[in-house]
Amino acid sequence: MLTAVSAWQEALSADIQARFGVALDPARIPFTFPPKTELGDASTTVAFALAKLVRRPPAEIAGALAGTRLPGVREIRTAGGYMNLFLDRGWAVERLLSRGFLPSGVEGKIIVEHTNINPNKAAHVGHLRNAVLGDTLVRCLRYLGRKVEVQNYIDDTGVQVADVVVGFERILGFKRYDLLASLFRKFHALPEGLRGANQSLHWVGGYSGHFSSFLQDAAREEGIDTTLLDECLKDSYGTSDSFCWVLYAKVAPWYEQSEQHKAARLETLHLMEEGGNETAEMAALVAEEMVRCHLRTMERFGVRYDVLPHESDILKIGFWASCFAKLKASGAVHLVPADSEDKNRGCWVMALQESEEFKGMSDADKVIVRSNGTVTYIGKDMAYQLWKFGLLGRDFHYRPFPGAPYPIWRTDAGRTKESWPAGEGAGPGAACAPSDASAAAAAPSPPRFGAGAGVYNVIDVRQSYLQKIVKEGLRQMGHEKEAERSVHYAYEMVALSQKTAALFEKAGRIKLSEEERSKPFVEMSGRKGLGLQADALLDLLVERARLEILKREPDLPAAESESRSNTLATAALRFYMVKYNKNQVVAFDLEQALAFEGDTGPYLQYACVRAENILRKAAEQGLAVPDPADPAALAECAPHLDEEGWGLLSLFLRVPIQVQMAVDSLDLNIVARQLYDAAQAFHAYYHHFPVIQEPDPAKRAARLLTVALFARLLREGLGQLLGIPVPDRM
């Protein structure tokens, strides 16, 4: 209803100017939606605000403005100073179906960066919240007419990747890059259904997946002691990312065994930075394999990306050098003299104490470049943010990411399309992708990435301080507009409920300390291996959904059962992750996530399927079901819509407003709640008003139209806004 409200505001503003000589900003004319349609479809209190300016009673002003011609409004009734609008229902329904209440062609690309999992192990349930929130934000922005580019930043140079490389090379003894590359290649050459272990293994433990077998065979061929390898495999699920999950948790205790072990991390990081050696190739290989696994995990519940910027490319292509030059030229950073008494002597520092965001801090200055010349994490983030806005004056090269489940680009430090090797992409990881000599030549040229008009960074609340510094850096470099358009979408973390944690501990999947058991929830730690892997959760959701389906339809074909169970699992997961306020810690509870009644995704799916079943039964009984897209059917049925049916449909009139509110406030649970309210309203309507059994033909046709409109609008809303598919049957 966004465009309708805008038109009403413009019309009322013009009428106010003409009648009262007051120039009132249209945006300041408020509209709300009454709880019952008997009170109107929309309402405004502009007369009260105007009364103070023109010194006349609100009721008199409202009466004068009641004659204003507003698009789609058949009548304006006044009650004191309130103006209640009643819509032409045929007009409103037609606009609902044609996206007539939504803006289109809004200029300026929006960049949304989300997910950003360290490419060193399997994704966990906490990553799922980031991905669902980020993807839902993308869907809402596109719904509102914005062009959106989705980025997933890959930190492939960090200590997390180095730790897994240490695990492979130093702990397990897999020192040859080509050996590990061949294992990944064999793994991804398997058909899709054979890449993972049996689904139940994610829950009960054990290993029988193909990647496990490949590792064991390779270790025996190389003469590697398999004692520790077998221990890791016992706790993994037979896939490469779950194996790295377990291996990563073994590295921290290994470091504590000796100073020599501790030094291995720094040595590995130095080799990764130098490049051109076996360790650097191993790191690139591991990172690319983990990204490939992450893409497949996120694809399972409908999350996709447009481009994968890699930190290694940011460093190689000199983004930081350009950013540093801009910081110095603008005076945003200063060098603390090396001979001073300041603790930051020899460092390049950004002064923050004068900024409103940092006032009152005792030590507000932030080191951007250390005294040894190395750039801090925040410096690289500033360079990346400048590039996102098209302010850096430099760009990446791009190539297709190899072995992805759908076409997607990754950054590259220097290769052009003409130099891509066979197998889709360049670099060590290309060895893992199926070889296709024509792939590079056939690939399209990449679109223009970056240069956004606005940027959303979806990163949990623990990064709020650093995100404020990135924003302040833009401001101090003179990019005030871009600083204001840099939005940190902060959200609270995901933990495990004590009930769920105890369930997994009993199954031998995690081990809790007494301190952890005493807390309200259990925080996850990848270093400790404590947490619920995303694929394990998804597999369990699918399995539980399948069992529920087979209870009701035991003879359902396997393919149909699999399709429906995946659809239900997607709804359960996505709705669970988005239904909470962003400032709430989500204590993930297995039973709640799997519930098929109440405030859940499957409940919304069921409302839609139930409505479609009514229409199907009506058609089977030979009743004419009005087509919502047929203007003649709308014109015939609209006058016979009952107030309760119109009240149900009017909830969808508010969706565009609610989506805009959700984007503005970054509380996407507003959208989830609006669609949930619509589903509840439909169930109440169905229980109180007969549809097929209604004896009056005109009323029956109007109610069938109501049900048809509801089914269509809810299916579209779930898919477009929340990424929740709806099965044909449940």
Image: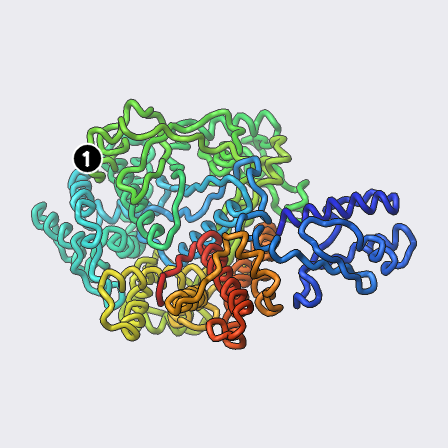
Task: Locate residue 401, reporting x and y percent.
Answer: 31, 37
Task: Locate residue 657, reporting x and y percent.
Answer: 61, 53
Can see residue 522?
A: no
Number of on-image labels? 1
Residue 51 is left or right of residue 105, and the answer is right
Residue at horizontal 9%, vertical 45%?
A: 222
Specify the quadrant of the image occupied by residue 592: bottom left
- Within 10 angstroms of label 1, few (less than 14), some, or many (20 or more) residues? some
Disc 1 residue type?
Answer: Ser
Residue 588 is left or right of residue 48, and the answer is left
Residue at horizontal 28%, vertical 75%?
A: 551
For the residue labelled by badge 1, is the local secondary structure a helix, a strand or a loop?
A: loop
Can see residue 195?
A: yes
Front residue of this view, candidates 322 and 727:
727
Asked if residue 248 is positioned above or below residue 381 in the image, the reply reads below
Which residue is denoted by mark 1 in the rendering? 435
Asked if residue 442 is positioned above or below residue 36 in the image, the reply reads above
Task: Locate residue 602, reporting x and y percent.
Answer: 41, 66
Residue at horizontal 52%, vertical 47%?
A: 143
Front residue of this view, candidates 72 and 304:
72
List the single residue furthest toward the bottom: 688
Residue 242 is left or right of residue 473, and the answer is left
Locate the C terminus and report the quarter of the image it occupies: bottom left
Task: Locate residue 553, reporting x and y percent.
Answer: 28, 72
